[in-house]
């Protein structure tokens, strides 16, 4: 049988109606995440520069700095350019001082509540296989310190992308549900890490996203993220050296 073309009115119903502001957030976000996965991981550095580094410690440092640079490109520069192209400001997406202090104590409580779980996680082999990110920290402490500076700075980009660009960018259309939309890709970038950490990322995304909306700022999330990251690395070094 010959296929019958639906009338124009039916075709019109089938056409997607995606609001422009949603398109300008979710499509670039998908492209940034794709860029990170296929070009921005530490292992990609060795593909492009196989002979870089005078020793194993320096080679790993360069790999991780490549990842940090890619993170700034995909999670900060791209969203920032799109924000400016729309005539908006980074402060509209959370890069500003928190409004009021009502919720600020929750950031401290969030970190302190995470500490017992981090200590418990540090006793597991899969945690020590993942952390510290710079695997030769005990042999090359200076390289580790250099990496930690860039590592901690990447959390500015992570919070701007997931709690700023995605949450604030979708707030007008989705309200508080924008937090859940942003939690999905944030959970997925943790795939490959220990499962408890990935599950914790879902909780963290919801809590930090909600707090970002309430305080109109991502700075509290940046600090909590940095504190958790440095604690995990220090616990891993302590366990590895004991």
Image (spheres, rainbow, N blue to C red):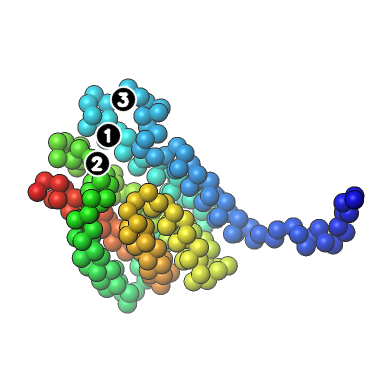
Question: Residue drawn 45% across and 42% down?
Answer: 37
Q: CA distance from mark 2 to mark 1?
A: 7 Å
From where the camera sits, is residue 92 visible? Answer: no
Q: Residues within 10 Å of mark 1 (few under 14, many from 20)?
A: many
- Residue 52, numbered circle: 3
Question: Residue drawn 32% across and 77% down?
Answer: 102
Q: CA distance from mark 2 to mark 3?
A: 17 Å
Residue 162, compared with residue 129, is above or below; it is below
Question: Residue drawn 27% across and 26% down?
Answer: 53
Please state if 153 lies on the left or on the right of 188 as rendered.
left
- Residue 60, numbered circle: 1
Q: Quadrant of residue 50?
A: top left
Verify CB contact (< 8 Å) between mark 2 and mark 1: yes
Q: Earlier in the sequence, mark 2 or mark 3?
A: 3
Q: Which residue is mark 2?
A: 134
**Element type at marker 1?**
helix
Please state if 71 lies on the left or on the right of 135 as rendered.
right
Q: Earlier in the sequence, mark 3 or mark 1?
A: 3
Percent position (x, y) of residue 222?
32, 58
Q: CA distance from mark 3 to mark 1?
A: 10 Å
**Element type at marker 3?**
loop
Percent position (x, y) of residue 183?
45, 61
């Amino acid at each position: 049988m010959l296929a019958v073309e639906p009338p124009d009115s039916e075709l019109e119903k089938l056409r997607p109606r995606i609001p422009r502001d949603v398109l300008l957030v979710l499509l670039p976000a998908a492209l940034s995440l794709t860029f990170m996965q296929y070009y921005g991981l530490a292992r990609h550095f060795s593909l492009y520069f196989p002979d870089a580094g005078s020793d194993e410690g320096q080679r790993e440092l360069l790999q991780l700095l490549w990842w940090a640079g890619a993170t700034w490109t995909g999670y900060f520069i791209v969203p920032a350019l799109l924000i400016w192209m729309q005539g908006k400001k980074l402060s509209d997406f959370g890069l500003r001082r928190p409004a009021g202090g009502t919720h600020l104590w929750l950031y401290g409580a969030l970190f302190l509540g995470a500490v017992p779980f981090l200590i418990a996680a540090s006793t597991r082999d899969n945690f020590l296989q993942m952390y510290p990110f710079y695997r030769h920290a005990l042999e090359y402490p200076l390289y580790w310190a250099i990496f930690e500076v860039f590592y901690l700075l990447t959390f500015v980009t992570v919070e701007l992308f997931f709690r700023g660009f995605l949450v604030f960018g979708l707030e007008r259309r989705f309200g508080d549900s924008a937090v859940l939309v942003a939690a999905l890709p944030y959970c997925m970038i943790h795939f490959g890490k220990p499962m408890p950490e990935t599950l914790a990322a879902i909780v963290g995304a919801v809590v930090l996203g909600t707090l970002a909306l309430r305080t109109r700022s991502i700075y509290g999330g940046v600090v909590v993220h940095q504190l958790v990251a440095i604690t995990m690395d220090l616990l891993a070094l302590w366990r590895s050296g004991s």
